[in-house]
Amino acid sequence: MASFRIAVLGGDGIGPEVIDQAVRVAQAAASKFDAAELHWNKLPWSSAYYQEHGRMLPADGWDTLAKHDAILFGAVGNPAVVSDKITVHELLLPMRRKFDQYVNMRPAYLFDGVPCPLVGKKPGDIDMLVYRENTEGEYAPVGGKLYPGTDREVAIQNAVFTRGGCERILRAGFEAARKRPRKKLTSITKSNALIYGLTLWDDAYNAVRKDYPDVQSNSLLVDAAAMDFVRKPEAFDVVVASNLFGDILTDLSAAVAGSIGLASSANINPTKAYPSMFEPVHGSAPDIAGRGVANPLAAILSAALMLDHLELAAGATAVRKAVAAVLKSGRVSTADVGGTATTVQVGDAVLAAV
Ligand code: NAI
Ligand code: MG
């Protein structure tokens, strides 16, 4: 029997609430459809851990994580208590870089039964896959502050674009596009204004696209892309974007596809040299935390992406089918998609469908 070690970091706020449901569902699907055993190692690293220990994870924390086959992550962030400069910048973003999880894959799909904020869209009309660069770009922690706290204060925030970094995310996007029925790809740029980093991005795009004559591709400025995500989201198939642009566009793609509570993501190291990490797109949602009303489907769909990565394809498909069935029936859903059910009730319904 295949067996896998999964590190589970629920984190803060609704993170642990939704991850508990993802664990139950993934466990059942992997066992029933792939005869695989998943061993879950729950790790308490969060704002509460920081308050107690003065750090987000222990000194050997990265080594501990590296020993797992995958990481299932909820969200971190409790800005009322611990600055995002610590939670996000000492755990989440370094993880993506340390484990070279350069592909941040974020699907957006309009499920049957989910109210769409756009008029006249049918289930499946929105079916896009955003590949966000995850290890450099605008989120590279390169820069500094001079004369902080004075009236001469200066902040320098650099964006780092490397030829290799741009090419590898674009290539991953083209590979994904090639396997999808529409075989389309859009490269997101802003080289009209950001004339160094984003022209390098465009050069990489123009070089890589030559290797994929079977994929129909275009380049689009990020502001126009934001408009088209709303105006005609059905035009997009695979979308490849830098770290910042991909981050912003995927909250938008999640919203047009019904709710951020449905948006899943995978942070993948395609070489498998280090574990990949799977997490909902949303954050810790302090506004609804502790009430048991968060939508667990984004976390559950992220666990399905994890099963894909572990090559437990039957289980992954079963989870997605179960989620689609629950949404379609419309009987058990959380408030963000128009229902009144709790997080656990939605988890129960998906588990029953699996
Ligand atoms: P957020 O994604 O946590 O919440 C935005 C809005 O969406 C809120 O109104 C929230 O109630 C709603 N929402 C989010 N997930 C939901 C779900 N599963 N079901 C129903 N409604 C849901 O973003 P926000 O409020 O800007 O950030 C809160 C904290 O999370 C901050 O500390 C931020 O830095 C952190 N954060 C962490 C991320 C991570 O760990 N990957 C990602 C994004 C934010
Ligand atoms: Mg985001």
Image: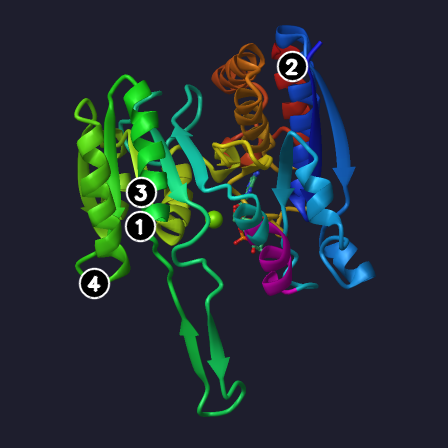
| Among the two numbered marks 4 and 3 on one chain, the one whose residue lies closer to the N terminus | 3
Which element carries disc 2, helix, strand or loop? helix
Toward the viewer: 222 or 324? 222
Residue at x 59%, y 22% (from the top left corner): 332
Quick check: 318 left or right of 223?
right
Within 10 Å of disc 3 (Cα), the crowding (few <14, some 14-19, many 20+) is many
Span shown in magenta: 83-93
Quick check: 178 left or right of 58?
left
Residue type for callout 1: Arg
Q: Is residue 20 shown to the viewer in this render?
A: no
Q: Nearer the viewer, mark 4 or mark 3?
A: 3
325 in magenta: no
Which residue is label 1 attached to? 163
Residue 9 x, y percent position in the rendering: 69, 41
Residue 71 x, y percent position in the rendering: 64, 35
Mark 3 → mark 2, Cα distance in angstroms:
34 Å
89 in magenta: yes
Within 10 Å of disc 2 (Cα), the crowding (few <14, some 14-19, many 20+) is many
Examine the image and state in which quarter residue 212 appears: top left
| Among the two numbered marks 4 and 2 on one chain, the one whose residue lies closer to the N terminus | 2
Toward the viewer: 310 or 124? 310
